[in-house]
Amino acid sequence: MSKVWLVTGASRGLGREIARAALDAGETVVATARSADAVRDAFAGEHHRLHALALDITDARAATSVAAETVERFGAIDVLVNNAGYAELGFFETFTDAAVRRQFEVNLFGTMNVARAVAPHMRQRRSGLIVTISSVSGLVSNGGGAVYSASKFAVEGWMEGFAQELAPMGVRSLLVEPGMLRTEFMDRKSARFGSIDIPDYAEAIAQYRAFVDGANGNQPGDPKLLAARIVALASQGEVPSRLVFGDDARQWAGAKVDQLRQEITRSAERG
Ligand code: NJP
């Protein structure tokens, strides 16, 4: 029987590919973004099992009504894909406090809003899967990515614990940590840059922006492949708790684990 998927951030990028892959697998998909028209345009009459709804994830009430409307119309939410997000890129001191808060408002609190709206329904049914699109930047932080990483580390910390709370009630969790994916994530349409000029950082920031502009459109990760992996995993009885996707992500995450392990050992030696 067809399952019901609720996907956030489905107007483009990874969310759109996940929605497409689920539709191609025969599922019913409620695809959301801030504008329902943007979602409809992205799929342009492709599927009768696609239902586009407007959802700005920073609006907790809207998240609750989208979850309720989905359950009322389709009887269930089997899979939630908490995907919507964006990046504040640049050096920490170049961000206003408002920009840092906006990053958390979307990536952390927005993602929590949607989970909070859907989890009661899944608990009640003792069934469901929450897929959270985090990032390898939720495991590793680098200069230029401190603010984005802070939001994704927070997502990791929250979801790692919340998953344990949900597991006894039959609700499963998959945290996804992709490396760099060919989406519009690094495009000026999605990414934002720090706005405060600090001469000490000027040269490093110029290099960082050149890196971002050069990487935009040339990222190694294929969002279609990741979408297919997620849809395949969702149909399995046993879902892993994490999916680190891409050679770049596995390298960075592996190096971080090695470094942590060394530091833990050295900490013990120091007494
Ligand atoms: O980015 P992009 P991705 N409320 O810019 C939506 C993570 N990730 O697909 O409302 C609701 O092509 C926006 O919709 P719209 C990343 O952190 C990526 O790459 O129309 N929706 C659009 O559909 C994020 O969590 C990479 O503007 C909101 C979508 O989000 C996820 O992957 C690497 C919204 C963004 O599409 C998808 O990003 C990585 C809001 N307030 C993790 N704000 C990567 N691409 O390299 C934005 O490790 N959206």
Image: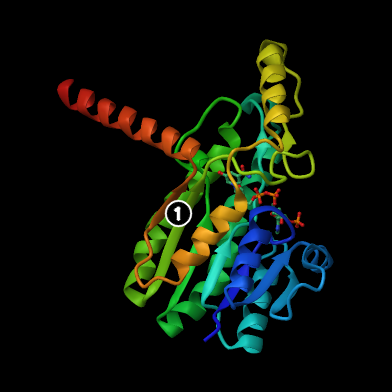
Few, some or many C-alpha atoms within 10 Å of disc 1 (few <14, some 14-19, many ≥20)? few
Return the x and y of residue 217 as percentages of the image width and height: 71, 38
Return the x and y of residue 114 as percentages of the image width and height: 59, 66
Q: Quadrant of the C terminus?
A: top left
- Left or right: 160 with respect to 66? left
Q: Residue at image x 53%, y 41%?
A: 179
Disc 1 designates what residue? 158
Using the rendered view, name the quadrant where residue 220 is placed: top right
Q: How is the image coloured?
A: rainbow
Q: Residue at image x 64%, y 51%?
A: 85
269 or 252: nearer the viewer:
252
Q: Is residue 226 above or below residue 139?
A: below
Using the rendered view, name the quadrant where residue 51 is placed: bottom right
- Left or right: 114 with respect to 40? left
Using the rendered view, name the quadrant where residue 208 is placed: top right
Counting the numbered discs, the total is 1
55 or 234: nearer the viewer:
234
Label 1: which secondary element: helix
Q: Is residue 89 above or below residue 152?
A: above
Q: Amino acid at mark 1?
A: Trp
Q: Is residue 182 above or below residue 129?
A: above
Q: Residue at image x 46%, y 68%?
A: 234
Q: Is residue 99 above or below residue 13?
A: above
Return the x and y of residue 231 as percentages of the image width and height: 52, 66
Q: Residue at image x 18%, y 20%?
A: 270
Return the x and y of residue 106 as percentages of the image width and height: 65, 52
- Left or right: 103 with respect to 136? right
